Image (tube, grey):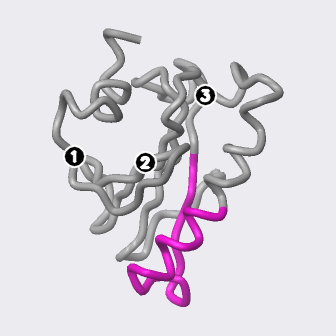
Amino acid sequence: MTDCVFCKIVAGDLPSKKVYEDDDMLAFHDIQPAAPIHILIIPKRHFASLSAGEEQDWPVVGQMQRVAAQIAKELGVEESGYRVITNIGANAGQIVHHLHYHLMAGARLAPLGVHN
């Protein structure tokens, strides 16, 4: 997609601070981090979200999980803990409509799903 910022990063048209790359995916530092460590993990093939994935995409989605664990280990946060999250749609806060995982770590993160 010509107007997708992540597709432009994959194509090399926009810079990124890469931490991982293979034939199917790319991981790089978020330019607006929400935690001391904030990595985005994306498939190189464009699809908007988990809801938009097709049969051929599921192996790559599984691979994204493996890469998240590998990056956490390489960054030294495997033991202290990290969060992997994806947003799907406007109500979840998805801004870039290209599937991506946020790997966040490096501090105690607020619990999710805790209601007062």
Image coords of residue 101 (percent x, y): 52, 46
Distance from Cα at disc 3 to Cα at disc 1: 23 Å
Which element type, helix, strand or loop, lies under badge 2? strand
Q: Which mark is residue 88?
A: 3
Query: How busy is the neighbourhood of tag 2: few (under 14 within 10 Å), some, or many (20 plus)?
Result: many
- Which-is-in-front pick, marks 2 and 3? 2
Q: Decide: marks 2, 3 in contact (CB < 8 A)? A: no
Q: What kind of element bears circle 3?
A: loop
Q: Which mark is residue 26?
A: 2
Q: Which residues are magenta?
A: 66-85
**Residue density around tag 1, few if under 14, some if 14–19, many if 20 or more, within 10 Å:** some
Within 10 Å of disc 3 (Cα), the crowding (few <14, some 14-19, many 20+) is many
Q: Amino acid at mark 3?
A: Ile
Instruction: Compare marks 3 and 1 and give the one earlier in the sequence.
Output: 1
Cα distance between the residues tagged 1 and 2? 10 Å
**What count of labels does the image hold?**
3
Q: Residue at x 36, y 17 (%)?
A: 4
Q: In the displayed structure, does residue 19 sit left or right of residue 41?
A: left
Magenta stretch: includes residue 42 = no
The residue singled out by tag 1 in the image is 16
Earlier along the polypeptide chain: callout 1 or callout 2? 1
User: What type is the residue that disc 2 sits on?
Assistant: Leu
Work out whether 49 lies above or below 33.
Answer: above
The amino acid type found where label 1 is placed reads: Ser
